[in-house]
Amino acid sequence: MFAVNNFMVEIDQNSIAERFMRYVQIDTQSDPQSNAQPTTEKQKDLSKLLLRELQHMGITAELDSYGYVYATIPSNSDKKNVPVICFCSHVDTAPDCSGTNVKPILHKNYNGDDIVLPDDPSQVLKITDARYLKNHVGSDIITASGNTLLGADDKGGVAVIMEAASFLINNPGLKHGEIKIVFTPDEEVGKGTAKIDMQKLNAKFGYTMDGGEAGSLEDETFSADGATIIINGVIAHPGYAKGKLVNAIKIAGEILDALPKKEWAPEVTEKKQGFVHPVRVEGIAERATIEFIVRDFDNDKLKEHGEKLRMLALNIIKKYPGVTMEFSIKEQYRNMKSILDKHPEVVAYAEEAIKRTGLKVKTESIRGGTDGSRLSYMGLPCPNLFTGMQGIHSKLEWIGVKDMAKSAETIVHLCMVWEEKSPL
Ligand SMILES: [Zn+2]
């Protein structure tokens, strides 16, 4: 425990567990096929509840038609120049696994045994598979019941922000600058920042609460491109095609088969290694399209991956006279580290806040993107902080209650650190 301004920052575990379990029961699955914003109207069921709860705390908040909740906790500091900081999490859950009728189960004082989920006994959470469970023997954890995901990603983030907000409001002696909160829809389908109003948000720095193990701080994401190869074959009547027809679908297959199998693919890479990954194939004999995602932490290497893919395809295409290829690369998002390095205090203060909760800081890189990577490039430098979520997007998803409490404590400390470090 760390005492600052004579206040102990200690979040009540029962309160945050209860809050979290209330939120996960609301179905907020987003839909990658939908062009609506939000992609599913039901996400607003949670947003509306959050709006009411914020207002009930006395916090000014609003919900817009796109499903974004914006809230402001005014500064209570005498200092005039404390930067406005923002905490962000997403209300939606991943389309990979059902989010309908989530029944959270609180396992009090977890004893380390296998947990058989009651609604589908084939779903068993084991320490041998989920090593991090070890850290939670003797404390409380929450799982789903077997038929659905839990939705800790990212209702864990939502719950910790709400609990921290409540704590700040109930402890007005804790000094902080203006704090903004934003809850976004559609993060899981890549549209979490699509309709975000940066002017309304009006924050200088931000933190997404969308990370895993206690103490983890992610200041680096992949840089990401999408690549598309379109193959134009040579078409002829199949009955009289000898020596003429070249089937675009078969060439697509040849390109896919030529991709390295022991490197350069998500299934054989880890840590700082990048990859190229086919995600969709579509075609007729005349014309076939392959879509790829391309990932690396380094922008130059990302470019090289794209070029290597283009050359690999081109060398196959060249064997077939008359066949042509269209190759295009589209930027998806960029590694947030180059932005964060320009504002080292954003990460440094987060590290300080984590340490004040008594945890060790684990700096990590995300092999993916977050809303924070996009926000960083939209002018809001925004690393990602832990919430405790584990086994995300699956029926074996779980979260430790003490991790959530530490995450909320980190937010409270972070608000105080920004105030303390600001000049009078
Ligand atoms: Zn998430």
Image (tube, helix red, strand yellow):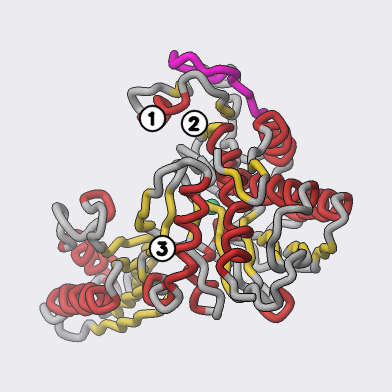
How many residues crowd mark 2 within 10 Å: few (<14), some (14–19), many (20+)?
A: many
At horizontal 46% and vertical 37% (from top left) the residue drawn is 391
- For the residues labelled 3 and 2, the Cα–Cα distance comes to 27 Å
| 67 vs 164: above or below | below
- For the residues labelled 1 and 2, the Cα–Cα distance comes to 9 Å
Mark in front: 3 vs 2: 3
Quick one: SS at disc 2? loop
Q: Check disc 2 and report the residue beneath it.
A: 396
Give residue 84's mark.
Answer: none
Give yes or no for residue 264 being in the magenta stretch: no
Residue 321 location (% of width, % of height): 15, 84
**Predominant SS of the magenta segment:** loop
Amino acid type for the residue under numbered disc 1: Ala
Residue 146 left/right relative to 246: right
Mark in front: 1 vs 2: 1
Query: Quadrant where the C terminus lies?
Result: bottom right
Amino acid type for the residue under numbered disc 2: Leu
Give yes or no for residue 112 being in the magenta stretch: yes
Residue 10 location (% of width, % of height): 64, 38
Mark in front: 1 vs 3: 3
Q: Which residues are magenta?
A: 103-117
Q: Closer to the N terminus: mark 1 or mark 2?
A: 1
Residue 221 left/right relative to 46: left
Q: Check disc 1 and report the residue beneath it.
A: 130
Give residue 219's mark.
Answer: 3
